[in-house]
């Protein structure tokens, strides 16, 4: 059984406290993780400057080259992870076993993370609008316009409290390394695999190990990370996001409430968008913040809901090794039961119809886990509570709403795909501050262009634009005498 | 491993003698609490509900299992005087509380038990690290808490003066329940600031009590100021709480206390206790023993057992896991078996404490998610 130990600025720490990682379906232990408390995190973060110093000693261009090599190693190599050498297949099996994600989804998430790492130069070019990275490294410089620009790093390290069940989110912290900002990560207890393997790949590629800390642990460790890092990101529920709202030191990532809005001009052709809608709802077992949880249109909503239900309603539980598996397990069965109870409440409201009712039982209980099979509900008005819901399984509400009311009623929307040729509607969607990522045209909500910022631009989060004026000092008076 | 492998002949002899003293003490304590002339109104009333006569049928410690389990809810509400044994009527009475963040707290009346417990505990403290006459800092809860007065008495008993801070643990628990983590951090800082002010004001403080969380906070705050617990003059600390894990202890010894005491670091000893029982002493902790923490109750005044999760009358084997069960057997307070909210492993007697102990204490797994631990 593999043992993962905490990493303290590149040095492995042999903890005396361990938690077991268990197989989602059998409950058998598959790994041991050594944990640390908040005291160790707090203590280490007092010397966080050393992590940035270690990265500043390597030119950005060299770090970008290392990112490319790390991408290759992450995706294909056999790497030291914990007390073992880990192959790609080991990684996939371990991640699937602890998170309940089908193996092919683990491979997709791995490819996504590797893609971002491999294309880091272009991604940073886009995030920084083409800024020479040496300007970020030195803190100031001239872009060639004869004007000094200055960007000051707001933190020597980026802290991140990572999620348990979403291996795709790790793309968000990867750019910190070529930006010469260290990483202090608290891995999720069920998904330590990506951060551990990614850090190993970075180190094998030559990135200074002193730039990395991994702090598996409880709330205590996460709390210390958030309290002591000048910039940190956290992944959690809507409540987590609300708790950190307005805090400039924290980037909180929660439910996406991503949506597809169909304009009146194209809604009669809704069948042309059926595949797009199905993919947006069903991909990655509906777990991502970029999965579509709401489809809004002014008419044909029942037909749309019925057509999606016909495609995803029959989807059933398959073994995680099956390439056709579409559903991830809830590793905590009570979470599935609680979620299903909330859905039942949603369905009890007048005007809400379960369009997948004919496709059998939704809650599938197993000894150590549970599944929720896909659900499509129809809401006859945006007033219905379900119109604002998002759950951790393939679940979508198809909402009947006049186009003129849509943009003021959709609420927070991480990805908004707007299907229309109506230039006024497109312009209004562009102005709608509820929508973070705007897709105009037939782009599934789950297909992200990584050359554009996601939930805030990481460079804006880590650096502050400011003035930096210089003038030559007069010659020393002593020299003139 | 057999019991004989775990316990030497000499320790077994001592354990047998200790058991005889416990049996004798149990009978004497039961006689006191159930005698119409000396018992408390509570236990005299309870006697009528029992299906046996404690005055004639409790002949040894094991006979206490005839009593129903003590329910700490009995301690909620008044009148507090129902707990005062008639044999002590007229003496000054303290009341100490636990809980009470919301609703009625549990109240225990005390006359001198907290003094006696801490005087006994004092005998276990090495003078090298807790010098007689040295002043103390009490970095823990204030208000209606047994701990606050007990530490002060310990300091005075050893010839020193105790400095205290203001700390309201009920407010701390409310902050956690409300999710006001920034306020929680600020309140912790407020407590630590008070401690640093005292420690740096020339009061010659060498000894202290601190909860693990506050000790960690104080150590960090001092290090941020470029100093340390050792540099401000602390030589001995005793600390307590269920989050006292081997890993935390190792972190404290290696990174807060400047290494093991025998290599020049600050000495720290763990304790385990509560308002019902008093406090249990820790066996000295060492790196060689994996920073294992074992507690031993101050027998015969109090007893800890580790019992089966399924049957609280059955002890588990040495090294096996079970629920912690407490007994308090003083002339002020009688607890004939109370299931603590903790679990741990049963430890064998040893030379210093020739009776059962408990190690690896942590919140009872069935209650753990509902328990707020380590809050101050």
Image (tube, rainbow, N blue to C red):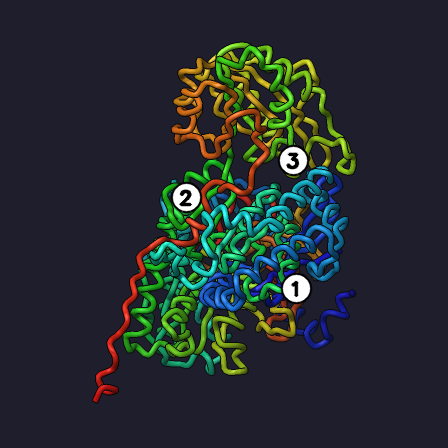
User: Quick one: label 3, few (<14), some, or many (20+) residues within 10 Å?
Assistant: many
Residue occupied by mark 3? A330
Viewer-proximal residue, A54 or A160?
A: A54
Q: Residue at x 63, y 75 (%)?
A: B351
- The chain ID associated with circle 3 is A
Tell me the element at label 2: helix
Q: Quadrant of residue B179?
A: top left
Chain letter of mark 2 equals: A
Q: Is residue B140 visible?
A: yes
Viewer-side label of 1, 3:
3
> Could you say which is closer to the camera, residue A475 or residue A212?
A475
Where is residue A106 drawn, in percent x and y? 69, 42
Report the residue at 75% width, 41% height from top. Answer: A26
Q: x and y percent of residue B167 in the render?
A: 34, 57
Between the residue at mark 1 and the residue at mark 3, the CA separation in whole angstroms equals: 39 Å
Counting other residues with Cα less than 10 Å from the Cα at mark 2, is it few (<14), some (14-19), or many (20 or more)? some
Q: Which residue is painted at 49% across and 66% down in the image? A: A56
Q: Report the residue marked by disc 1.
A: B347
CA gap, disc 3 to disc 2?
A: 26 Å
| Looking at the image, residue A479 lies above or below residue B64 | below
Residue lying at the far front in this picture: please name it.
A145
User: Tag 3's secondary structure?
Assistant: loop
Of B338 and A325, nearer the camera is A325
Residue A97 x, y percent position in the rendering: 72, 44
Q: Dot 2 corresponds to which residue?
A: A244
The outermost residue toward the bottom is: A481
Up-down: is A273 above or below A243?
A: above
Label 1 marks a residue whose chain is B
Image quadrant for the N terminus of chain A? Answer: bottom right
**Who is closer to the viewer here, A377 or A290?**
A290
Name which residue lies at 47% across and 83% down. B128
Disc 1, SS:
strand
């Amino acid at each position: 059984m593999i043992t993962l130990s905490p990493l303290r600025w590149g040095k492995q720490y042999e903890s005396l406290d361990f938690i077991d990682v268990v197989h989602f379906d059998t409950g058998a232990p598959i790994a041991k993780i050594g944990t640390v408390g908040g005291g160790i995190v707090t203590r280490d973060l007092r010397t966080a400057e050393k992590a940035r110093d270690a990265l500043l000693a390597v030119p950005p261009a060299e770090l970008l080259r290392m990112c490319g090599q790390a991408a290759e190693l992450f995706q294909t190599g056999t790497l030291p992870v914990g007390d073992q050498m880990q192959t790609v297949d080991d990684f996939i099996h371990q991640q699937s076993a602890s998170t309940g994600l089908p193996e092919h989804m683990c491979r997709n998430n791995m490819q996504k993370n590797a893609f971002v790492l491999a294309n880091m130069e272009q991604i940073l070019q886009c995030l920084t609008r083409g800024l020479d990275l040496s300007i970020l490294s030195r803190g100031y410089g001239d872009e060639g316009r004869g004007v000094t620009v200055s960007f000051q790093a707001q933190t020597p390290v980026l802290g991140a409290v990572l999620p348990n069940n979403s291996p795709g989110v790790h793309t968000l912290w990867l750019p910190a390394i070529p930006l010469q900002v260290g990483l202090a990560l608290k891995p999720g207890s069920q998904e330590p695999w990506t951060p551990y393997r990614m850090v190993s790949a970075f180190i094998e590629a030559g990135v200074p190990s002193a730039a990395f800390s991994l702090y598996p642990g409880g709330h205590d460790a996460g709390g210390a990370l958030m309290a002591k890092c000048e910039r940190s990101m956290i992944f959690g529920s809507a409540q987590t996001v609300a708790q950190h709202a307005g805090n400039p030191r924290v980037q909180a990532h929660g439910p996406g409430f991503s949506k597809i809005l169909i304009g009146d001009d194209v809604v009669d052709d809704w069948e042309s968008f059926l595949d797009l809608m199905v993919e947006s709802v069903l991909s990655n077992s509906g777990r991502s913040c970029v999965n579509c949880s709401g489809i809004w249109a002014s008419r044909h909503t029942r037909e749309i809901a019925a057509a999606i239900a016909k495609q995803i309603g029959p989807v059933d539980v398959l073994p995680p090794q099956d390439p056709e598996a579409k559903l991830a397990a809830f590793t905590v069965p009570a979470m599935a039961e609680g979620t299903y109870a909330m859905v039942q409440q949603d369905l009890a409201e007048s005007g809400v119809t379960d369009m997948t009712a004919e496709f059998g039982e939704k809650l599938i209980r197993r000894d150590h886990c549970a599944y929720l099979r896909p659900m499509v509900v129809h809401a006859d008005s945006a007033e219905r509570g379900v119109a604002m819901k998002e759950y951790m399984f393939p679940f979508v509400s198809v909402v009947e709403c006049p186009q003129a009311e849509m943009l003021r009623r959709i609420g927070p929307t991480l990805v908004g795909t707007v299907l229309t040729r109506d230039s006024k509607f497109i312009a209004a969607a562009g102005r709608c501050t509820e929508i973070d990522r705007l897709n105009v045209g037939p782009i599934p909500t789950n297909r992200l262009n990584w050359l554009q910022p996601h939930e805030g631009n990481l460079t804006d989060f880590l650096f502050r634009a400011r003035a930096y004026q210089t003038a030559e000092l007069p010659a020393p008076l002593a020299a003139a005498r | 491993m057999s019991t004989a492998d775990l316990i030497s002949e000499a320790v077994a002899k001592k354990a047998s003698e200790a058991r005889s003293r416990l049996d004798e003490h149990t009978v004497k304590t039961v006689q006191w609490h159930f005698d119409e002339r000396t018992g408390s109104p509570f236990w005299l009333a309870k006697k009528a509900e029992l299906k046996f006569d404690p005055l004639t049928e409790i002949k040894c410690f094991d006979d206490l299992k005839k009593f129903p389990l003590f329910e700490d809810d009995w301690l909620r509400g008044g009148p507090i005087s129902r707990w005062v044994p008639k044999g002590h009527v007229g003496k000054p009475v303290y009341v100490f509380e636990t809980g009470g963040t919301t609703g009625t707290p549990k109240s225990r009346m005390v006359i001198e038990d907290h003094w006696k417990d801490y005087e006994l505990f004092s005998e276990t403290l090495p003078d090298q690290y807790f010098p007689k006459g040295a002043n103390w800092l009490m970095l823990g809860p204030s208000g209606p808490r047994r701990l606050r007065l007990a530490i002060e008495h310990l300091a005075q008993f050893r010839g020193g003066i105790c400095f205290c801070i203001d700390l309201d643990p009920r407010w701390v628990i409310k902050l956690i329940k409300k999710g006001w983590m920034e306020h929680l951090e600020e309140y912790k800082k407020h407590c630590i600031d008070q401690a640093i002010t005292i420690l740096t004001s020339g009061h010659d403080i060498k000894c202290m009590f601190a909860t693990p969380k506050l000790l960690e906070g104080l150590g960090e705050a001092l290090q941020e100021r470029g100093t340390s617990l050792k540099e401000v003059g602390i030589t001995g600390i005793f600390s307590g709480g269920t989050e006292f894990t081997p890993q935390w202890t190792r972190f404290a010894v290696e990174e807060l206390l400047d290494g093991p005491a025998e290599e020049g670091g600050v000495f720290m000893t763990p304790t385990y206790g509560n308002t019902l029982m008093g406090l249990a002493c820790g066996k000295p902790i060492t790196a060689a023993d994996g920073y294992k923490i074992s507690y031993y109750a101050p027998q015969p005044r109090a007893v800890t057992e580790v019992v089966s999760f399924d049957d609280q009358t059955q002890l588990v084997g040495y090294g096996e896991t079970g629920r912690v069960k407490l007994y308090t057997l003083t002339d002020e307070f009688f607890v004939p078996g109370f299931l603590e909210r903790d679990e741990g492993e049963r430890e064998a007697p040893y030379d210093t404490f020739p009776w059962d102990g408990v190690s690896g204490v942590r919140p009872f797994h069935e209650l753990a998610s509902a328990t707020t631990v380590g809050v101050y």
